[in-house]
Image: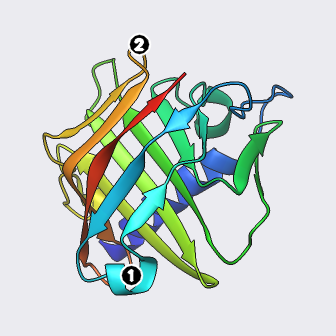
Amino acid sequence: MKTKLKLFTIALLVLSIMSCSSNDDSNSDGEVYGTIQLSGPDTSSVGSTLVVGNISEDAFNTTGTSDSVVLLDENTTIENDELVPTDFSNAFVIVAAEFTVNTEVNKAISMTILKDGVEYSYVCSTPPTTAADNTDCGTGFSVDKIAKEIVFSNTTVINVDTETILTMNGTINYD
């Protein structure tokens, strides 16, 4: 089961950094507003907030699906469909997806937080799947690309290494 989870995480991370075209997906013209509050045992390591500073709302070329949005810290952008961090010790990437077609999974999150040079990876899916270590994101998680809003309301993700749960709360609005 750990192997499937690692493969799921690696696949989502690879998709988020691979490029297929030369379009710039960074959000240099739009504004991103929102902070994600974190709770759970891992907050002693990763902190209790994630301030979203950049976003890729047209994430098809970086994630492989048009149903996802990539949320980034203020020091990480996407240029030519590739992640460009400026702080290699502290950063985060959240791939949030809510699928609009009939799929086995309706919603999914793949998140990596880099804190003081240490990487922490989290996943979830709705409904829960073995690839997401049977962790349900919860009913309070949504990605609305029309309203340009991502909601995390008691959203649960699991640490792929320690299997501890991290709860996310916050609303991200973008232009």
Number of on-image labels: 2
Horizontal and vertical percent for residue 56?
61, 34
- Residue at the location (33% across, 18% down)? 100
- The answer to whether residue 131 is seen in the rendering is no
**Residue situated in front as seen by the camera: 101 or 107:** 107
Horizontal and vertical percent for residue 3?
40, 72
Going from N to C along the chain, the mark reached first, 2 or 1, is: 2
- Is 72 left, or right, of 48 in this rendering? right
Q: Quadrant of residue 19?
A: top right
- Residue at the location (51% across, 68% down)? 113
Q: Which mark is residue 103?
A: none
SS label for mark 2: loop
**Residue situated in front as seen by the camera: 107 or 3:** 107
State the residue position of label 1. Answer: 161
Horizontal and vertical percent for residue 90?
63, 73
- Residue at the location (19% across, 60% down)? 134
State the residue position of label 2. Answer: 146
- Residue at the location (47% across, 32% down)? 68
- The answer to whether residue 22 is seen in the rendering is yes
Q: Quadrant of residue 147?
A: top left
- Is 97 left, or right, of 105 in this rendering? right
Q: Amino acid under label 1? A: Asp
**Residue situated in front as seen by the camera: 122 or 151:** 151
Q: Quadrant of residue 50?
A: bottom left
Q: Amino acid under label 2? A: Ile
Instruction: Please say if 72 is above or below 87.
Output: above
- Is 24 left, or right, of 37 in this rendering? right
Find the distance from the CA under tag 2 to the CA under tag 1: 35 Å
SS label for mark 1: loop
Instruction: Please say if 135 is above or below 40.
Output: above
For the view shown, which residue lies furthest in the left direction? 139
- Is 32 left, or right, of 40 in this rendering? right
